[in-house]
Every structure is written in structure tokens, then in C-alpha cells.
Amino acid sequence: MTFVLIAATFIDLDTMLLPDQLTIPLLWVGIALALLGISPITLQESVIGAIAGYLCLWSVYWLFKLVTGKEGMGYGDFKLLAALGAWLGWAHLPMIILLSSVVGVVFGLIQLRMQNKGLDVAFPFGPYLAIAGWVSALWGDAITHFYLATVTGVY
């Protein structure tokens, strides 16, 4: 997964596209690993993660398009989040979405500031999804445990 996320990041930064040749196999391998019992998540969690990941960003895309009349992101972003959901399960999706959005906004604002351009500039979201997915894969459970312990006071 790591190498595909790295490749997807650099391709998206260069072309503003996430190729199906990376995202679709990544999705199916995640589901296959769950089916074979190799993944730490069940097949049900993998499939629900893939569907929920796709539909989350698809919904944001259409809501944005209805409100503004513009396309705010590409279908490759939906497919990448679906693939991450297939690998990590639906429970990791909120963290991936939150982390990628926060980091994307921060770096997007820095980019806008450095380039002295208006708010109507496109930038790739795939790299932030990839980074957030990788962080969630490595430390997601620990981050979630820390967050819940901090919020609830139960350690």
C-alpha cells in the first residue's frame, strides 16, 4: 500500500490526476486481503469501508457542485478514499477525512499565500488523502485511543 500511495501522491502533484491503474487495484487488493483473512479487518469492514469512502467524497463533490456549479474534486479522490477504506475499514475513514482536510487546508492556504493567487486555484487532494491514510494505517488506533481517552478522561 505504501508504494502505491507514494506513487499516487507524486502523480497527483504532477498531473492533478489519480490514475485508475493505481486506485482500482489498490481497492481490490484491500478487499482480497480481507477475503483471504490476511487483513486485520473483516471482509464486511473492508467492503463497507470501500463503499463509505467512495460515497463520502462523492457526496461532497455533488453538494459542492450543486452549490457552486463547479467541480471541487476529481473522481480519483473518491476512488483513493474507497481503496483506503478497503484496506483499513470504515472506522478509519473519519480520521482520514479529518486529517487530510485539515492538512490540505493548511498547505492549500500556504500555497495560495506564496503564489499570491485568489481562492479559485485548484490543488490536488490525493496527496493529503494518501498521507492521512498512511498515518491512519500506522498510528490510527493509537491516535483514536488517545483522542477518546483525552475527551472522556478514561485511560
Image (spheres, rainbow, N blue to C red):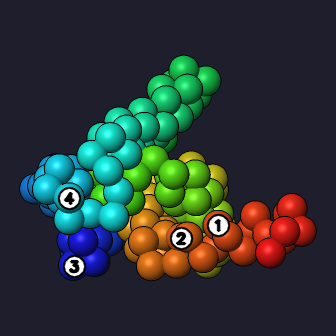
Which comes sooner in the sequence, label 4 or label 3?
A: 3
**How many discs mark residues in the rendered view?**
4
Q: Is residue 18 left or right of residue 28?
A: right
Dot placed on the residue nearer the N-terminal end, 1 or 4 = 4
Task: Tell me, for residue 144, which label it has, or none.
Answer: 1
Check disc 2: other Cα within 10 Å, few if <14, some if 14-19, many if 20+.
some
Determine contact: label 1, label 2, CB under 8 Å.
yes
Residue 1 location, x and y as percent?
A: 24, 71
* Front: mark 2 or 4: 4
Q: Which amino acid does label 1 sit on?
A: Thr
Q: Is residue 102 above or below residue 65?
A: below
Say which element carries label 2: helix
| Element on which disc 4 rests | loop
Which is closer to the viewer, label 1 or label 4? 4
Q: How far apart are marks 3 and 2 (CA)?
A: 19 Å
Q: Where is residue 148 in the image (x, y as percent from the top left)?
A: 76, 64
Residue farthest along the right direction in this orientation: 153
Visible residue check, residue 65: no
- Asked if labels 2 and 3 touch by Cβ distance under 8 angstroms, the answer is no
Q: What element carries label 1?
A: helix
Numbered badge on residue 3: 3
From mark 3 to mark 1, how far is it between C-alphas?
25 Å
Q: Mark 2 points at which residue?
A: 140
Location of mark 4 (residue): 37
Q: Is residue 59 left or right of residue 112?
A: left
The answer to which of marks 2 and 4 sits earlier in the sequence is 4
Measured Cα–Cα span from mark 1 to mark 4: 24 Å
Q: Which residue is drawn at 37% across and 45% down?
A: 45
N-term mark: 3 or 2: 3
